[in-house]
Image (tube, helix red, strand yellow):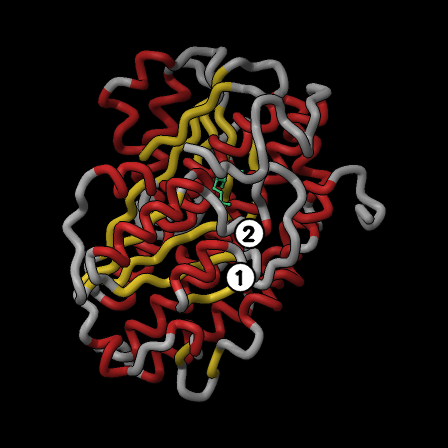
């Protein structure tokens, strides 16, 4: 049942080209340059009336939401905010009928996310679920939404659900953008890029042995920093969450710019920094942050664009991802960090599929 893999986590990591094909199947219109998301059940007129997006979730699902926030603002120019579901539910949130609340949950049963859904429904906003488990409570109570179609996720550490969530969020951003100022030509380009995601993942999976080799150098640390900017900032958070969960190494995901506002005091030869430094906006800034880390003797590992020799030379070790726009590069970068966490945890002898103290579905707050 693990399909020849030693753990569910690796099986699920390697399934991702296929799960993304399932997530996007029938949902991309290459001719009109848009996405088809009938489960949202919103007419073009209703979509254009939406004035704000509020995205709620917990853990990995919240990290996916942060990427959605960037994409929705970037493509569609609609203000978007992400809130941890418990904060949202207890804060007496300001939401109304022209806000679309997206509740993201793999299981569809997370207590805080469900309560956030109920609160948003109570306040009269539009609420849609991005859920993997068909017929789960959140899917039923939202009444509208988009199933991830990633298939059952058994490993406690979420991997394939995350990349499907991000893919759905990109399709939502595209849909909202096309109903506003985004041209058909630009829409077609974005559809083509989303269609390439399975290949981008395959490319990274083929470098698995190399990632395993790099991981050998990072098994004996107690702490790590993950840094990134823009679209890569949530990827840094997700990378840090993954390594904490399965290898029990303390890690923090930080915006690269924030490093010098305090955390840099922690850097020395025992604090590696993993930098999302692939091509795109902010890369030069991130690389100069990496230089600052090196000056404090921190070991530096870069996630870089394949063939980008200049930036690769700065790092002690690199993991490569294929060249693609920033909004899709989050996916190969996240997959690379999933594999990195997996190998670090395996080399440390950790229980990969069942980390201590964790449950797959958090149905109590
Ligand atoms: C991380 C992880 C958790 C979940 C979180 C939300 O690997 O598994 O952080 O992402 O508990 O769960 P769902 O998505 O089921 O609401």
Marks 1/2 in contact by CB < 8 Å: the verdict is yes
Q: Is mark 2 within 8 Å of ligand 1?
A: yes
Residue placed most toward the observer, 315 or 103:
103
Decide which of 307, 326 is in the foreground and name it.
Answer: 326
Q: Residue at x 26, y 54 (%)?
A: 120
Measured from the top left, where is residue 257 in percent x and y?
27, 33
Disc 2 crowd rating (10 Å Cα; few below 14, some 14-19, many 20+) is many
Instruction: Work out whether 256 lies above or below 60.
Output: above
**Circle 2 sits on which residue?**
161
* In this rendering, position of residue 264 left or right of residue 93: right
Residue 133 placement (x, y as % from top left): 57, 56
- Give the percent coordinates (x, y) of residue 128: 36, 63
Under tag 1, what secondary structure? loop
**Residue at (72, 42) in percent of width and height:** 8
Q: Quadrant of residue 181?
A: bottom left
**Callout 2: SS:** helix
Q: Residue furthest right?
A: 4
Callout 1: 10 Å neighbours few (<14), some, many (20+)? many
Give the mark count.
2
Q: Reading the chain from its start, which is encountered first: label 1 or label 2?
A: 1
Residue pictured at 53% horizontal, 13% vertical: 222
* Nearer to me, 243 or 131: 131
Residue 310 in the figure: left or right of residue 4: left
**Marker disc for residue 183:** none
On screen, 32 above or below 342? Answer: below
Beta carbon of the mark 1 residue lies under 8 A of ligand 1: no
Disc 1 target residue: 148
């Amino acid at each position: 049942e693990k399909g020849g893999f030693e753990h569910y986590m690796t099986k699920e990591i390697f399934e991702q080209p296929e799960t993304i094909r399932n997530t996007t199947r029938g949902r991309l219109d290459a001719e009109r340059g848009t996405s088809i998301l009938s489960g949202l059940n919103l007419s073009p007129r209703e979509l254009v009336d939406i004035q704000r997006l509020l995205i709620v979730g917990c853990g990995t699902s919240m990290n996916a939401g942060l990427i959605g926030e960037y994409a929705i603002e970037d493509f569609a120019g609609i203000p978007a905010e992400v809130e941890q579901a418990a904060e949202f539910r207890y804060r007496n949130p300001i939401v109304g009928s022209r806000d679309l609340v997206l509740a993201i949950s793999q299981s569809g049963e997370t207590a805080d996310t469900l309560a956030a859904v109920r609160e948003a429904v109570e306040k009269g906003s539009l609420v849609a679920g991005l859920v993997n488990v068909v017929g789960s409570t959140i899917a039923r109570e939202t009444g509208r939404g988009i199933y991830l179609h990633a298939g059952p996720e058994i490993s406690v550490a979420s991997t394939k659900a995350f990349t499907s969530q991000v893919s759905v969020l990109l399709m939502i951003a595209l849909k909202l953008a096309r109903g506003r100022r985004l041209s058909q030509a630009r829409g077609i380009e974005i559809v083509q890029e989303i269609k390439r995601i399975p290949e981008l993942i395959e490319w990274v999976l083929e470098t698995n042995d190399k990632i395993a080799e790099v991981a050998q150098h990072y098994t004996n640390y107690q702490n790590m920093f993950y840094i990134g900017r823009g679209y890569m900032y949530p990827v840094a958070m997700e990378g840090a969450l993954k390594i904490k969960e399965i290898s029990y190494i303390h890690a923090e995901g930080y915006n690269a710019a924030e490093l010098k506002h305090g955390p840099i005091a922690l850097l020395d030869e025992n604090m590696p920094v993993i930098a999302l430094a692939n091509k795109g906006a902010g890369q030069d800034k991130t690389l100069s942050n990496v230089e600052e880390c090196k000056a404090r003797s921190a070991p530096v590992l870069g996630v870089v664009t394949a063939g980008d020799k200049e930036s690769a030379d700065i790092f002690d070790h690199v993991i490569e991802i294929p060249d693609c726009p920033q909004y899709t590069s989050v996916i190969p970068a996240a997959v690379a960090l999933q594999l990195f966490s997996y190998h670090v945890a395996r080399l440390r002898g950790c229980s990969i599929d069942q980390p201590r103290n964790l449950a797959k579905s958090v149905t109590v707050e």
